[in-house]
Image (cartoon, rainbow, N blue to C red):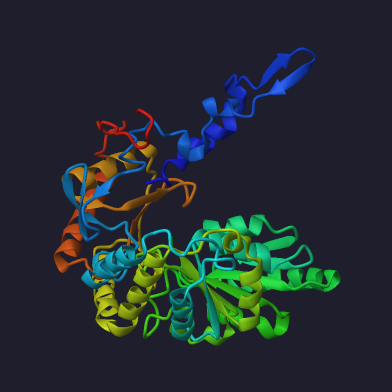
Amino acid sequence: MLYILLLIGNIFSLISPIFLKIPLQTKTSERIYMDLFAKFENQLGPIGDNADQVPGYFSFPKLEGDIANRMKFQGKECIVWSLNNYLGLANHPEVRKADADGAAEYGLAYPMGARMMSGNSNKHIQLERELADFVSKPDAMLLNYGYQGMVSAIDNLVTRHDVIVYDAESHACILDGVRLHAGKRFVFKHNDVEDCEKQLVRAKKLADANGGGILVITEGVFGMSGNQGKVKEIIGLKDKYEFRLFVDDAHGFGTMGKTGAGIGEEQDCMEGIDLYFSTFAKSMASIGGFIAGEVKILKFLRYNMRSQVFAKSLPMPLVIGNLKRLELLRSKPELKERLWHNVRRLQSGLREQGFDIGQTNTPVTPVFLHGNHDLFETTQLIYDLRENYGIFCSVVMYPVIPKGQLMLRLIPTAVHTDEDIDITLAAFTDVREKLNTKAYPKEFPPIKGEAVTSATV
């Protein structure tokens, strides 16, 4: 839902300097004092500018109860399609026990300190070895947070002499890492290998002139469209352009490939991926992440990634819990089989009913609702799905996708049921008809806001 709030916010951010009188300057004696915080009184950013539009419903909603296919939203049971709990491990009894046992034995503080200083343990090393073995890489290093780890890794891998080439639809953590780069970067059209090669031509010319190298960054599974990244095809360009490849496989780890080892296994190209990244926040239903690759590269990152060198180690209960999650991922193929049963049933049902789900070939399921739909219709649709049909899903609109379109993003998991899918298909058919016949009123739904922070709403 956060994506739809960008619409008014982006427009507002463009016109506000013209129409708003923001007290930016205060004259003190002979000098002008610029109040850094003054702009926040009237300009809270493209999402924050809409913070008062029913807080607690469209932004910062509270899902309550055990993490499952059905949870409570504002006291009502909803089928939840917004959680990346792909394999259903979040509430698996063995996982809950491992988490509880780890916390009881060690508490949340141990080990105290950064890994390099005083925060290492045999369990951390064991998890790294098992992860490296699972994704067929010589070495792996833990990250205390996936997003933070990706940003910091990119920052460490390149100097101002190097060039980055990256996919236009890369995740925000990649974009933030690229923004830190002091050198040149080139973006290629989403999943367009031909355009990727065009950018590599430019990158190689510049890198050769500067005495630098080239880092190509893409994703294994794109979390919005559900497309697999064209990893194998990009690898086919390596001999010609001499680059290193960094793949973010947050949505692919645990879901793609015969054993769930990710996009490298799915496309039979893991050897060509120089650095493989994934988070624990999706299939593993936890916190943290890891990077896997050559020993010499991981050794460099261990001693230089500021987000790890100067930050506390991953707490022991999370490490123990992640060891259990990885064990289940590897030993219980029925979890991934059930996930894909649900993926096929949901996606085939949507296609049979005439819905456009793009080119997804992964569990990520976008549903495009075409037409000139505005913000009022979007909020009415969300309200209708949640209140009248018991469906909780993410909604995306401009500027993330073309103006006038809506996208309902569904994440099927191993714990969803056939009944959940059938109810959702029927609900989507109904709301599509309401959109097409302009049945939704041109106003915000009659919803009462809730407190979303310690401040009073």
| Residue projecting furthest to the right | 209
Residue 386 relative to residue 122: left or right: left
Q: Is residue 434 positioned above or below 186 on the image?
A: above
Q: Residue at x 30, y 53 (%)?
A: 393
Residue at point 36%, 41% (across, down): 59
Query: Residue 109, relative to residue 202: is it above or below?
Result: above
Can the viewer see residue 346 in this picture? no
**Closest to the observer: 30 or 309?**
309
Q: Give the residue at x 24% y 65%.
A: 91
**Dividing the picture into quarters, in which one does residue 296 lie?**
bottom right
Q: Residue furthest left?
A: 419
Q: Is residue 427 above or below residue 118?
A: above
- Where is residue 381 shown, x and y percent of the image? 28, 44
Quadrant into which the C terminus falls:
top left
Residue at x 21% of width, y 70% of height: 93
Name the spot of residue 331 as percent of width and height, x first.
Answer: 30, 84
Count of labels shown?
0
Where's residue 454, x and y in %? Answer: 37, 34
Residue 367 is drawn in which quadrant? bottom left
Residue 416 visible, this angle: yes
Q: Is residue 405 left or right of residue 328?
A: right
Residue 29 percent coordinates (x, y): 77, 12
